Amino acid sequence: MNSFGQKFKFTTFGESHGKALGCIVDGVPAGIKVDESFIQSEMDRRKPGQNAFATARSEGDRVEILSGVFEGLTTGTPISMVIFNENQKSKDYTNVKDLFRPGHADFTYFHKYGIRDYRGGGRSSARETAARVAAGAIAKLLLKELNIEVLSGICEIDGIKGSKADFEFAKTSEIFSLDKDKEEFQKEAILNAKKEHNSVGGVALVKVKNAPKGLGEPLYYKLDSQIANAMMSINAVKGIEIGDGFESVSKKGSENNDEIRSFGFKSNHSGGILGGISNGDEIDIKVYFKPTPSIFIKQETIDINNNEVECELKGRHDPCVAIRGSVVAESMMALVIADMLLLNMSSKIENIKKVYI
Ligand SMILES: Cc1cc2nc3c(=O)[nH]c(=O)nc-3n(C[C@H](O)[C@H](O)[C@H](O)COP(=O)(O)O)c2cc1C
Ligand SMILES: C=C(O[C@@H]1CC(C(=O)O)=C[C@@H](OP(=O)(O)O)[C@H]1O)C(=O)O
């Protein structure tokens, strides 16, 4: 079992240097309008090779829908989508074929499976996240029908934090940072690291607008625990925060509580989730990405025979994975919300009656 979700489920397949990648999304209700140009526009926001802040690998990331859609509508049967790889350069990996890149998953995959697919990280490469964005686009089409929106953007790069509380959200990959005053410095930090053959980390903000109250199951399928599970499943994610997150630890209860009025909550320190259930306010999380492990600085490592060697990489790598990673985080959030919506259908007898009677 390696799928995500209980009702709105998906799984992905493929490798970075294999023939193709793809996903199967199961449990999608019938009758959702499938706008293929929307799916492609989501793919384009994540795809590599678009600017100096991303890997130079050039992929069209064109999605082909193989099943589950008829005359522009979902049929209620599994939706399968495929994305063919176009720009693999496996030769770049020949000199590190038998060794483990520090910080990447080469070491752990080898010890788990006993096989070294050295071609660009194989299944552990974040190229897999293209398939998640395709699945996330289907989730977003469901959310659109309910006027729920998921957005994301960058709020921190290499320790340079955005300062505005109310960010303008990035809609395309052209818009880089949520804080226009800090954007220039954040960009510079990435380009400087790149010049030095190094990489930097970053933080993405993900928000859900118009999420209804009541999403999330008690106790073992809470909305926040599922969001954490989804985000931590993304390559290079090392932590997440819900609402004020770690900052709330140093606050008094009186500062941290969101007081309640008849019109709603006076503040949103909770990030829109209480007791693992959405409270109707904006859902608001931060996702922390580590610096890209593949860097072009000589490092010490071992080979598959345990010999101590030096590792010198070639190839094409993101100098900061958080930039494209923010789009992946947004897709995973859409998938969690879609799953929770479908689970929520059966939380009240009135809802079940609406469907069946
Ligand atoms: C969008 C995205 C792009 C990435 N690009 C690269 C890359 O070009 N080179 C690399 O070494 N790692 C890249 N990573 C990170 C690795 O895939 C990841 O660090 C590796 O699989 C090890 O997993 P872990 O960091 O979660 O432990 C990327 C991650 C994301 C989310
Ligand atoms: C190709 C993509 O990103 C890749 C993610 C990645 C990694 O190790 O995660 C390593 C690089 O690829 P390659 O396997 O060719 O060395 C990136 O270019 C993509 O996101 O589509």
Image (cartoon, grey):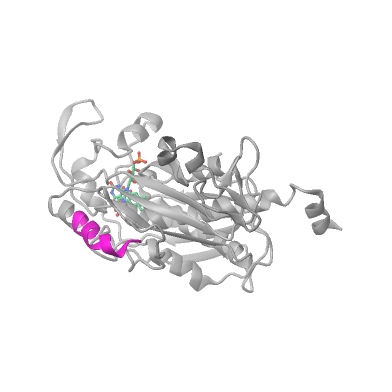
288 over 194 or under it: above or below: above
Residue at x-position 67% and y-position 64% = 75
The front one of 182 and 17 is 182
Q: Is residue 233 visible?
A: no
**Which residue extends farthest right?**
357
- The quadrant of the image that shows the C terminus is bottom right
Magenta range is 178-190
Position of residue 87 measured from the top left corner of the image (x, y, whole percent): 30, 61
- Identify which residue is drawn at 52% across, 71% down: 36
* Main secondary structure of the magenta stretch: helix
Q: Is residue 344 depicted above or below 116 in this figure? A: below
The part of the image, by quadrant, that contains residue 142 is bottom right
Query: Observer-nearest residue: 89 or 275?
Result: 275
Can residue 240 be seen by looking at this rendering? yes
Queried whether the magenta region covers residue 181, the answer comes back as yes
Residue 292 colored in magenta in the image: no
Between 19 and 252, the one lying in front of the other is 252
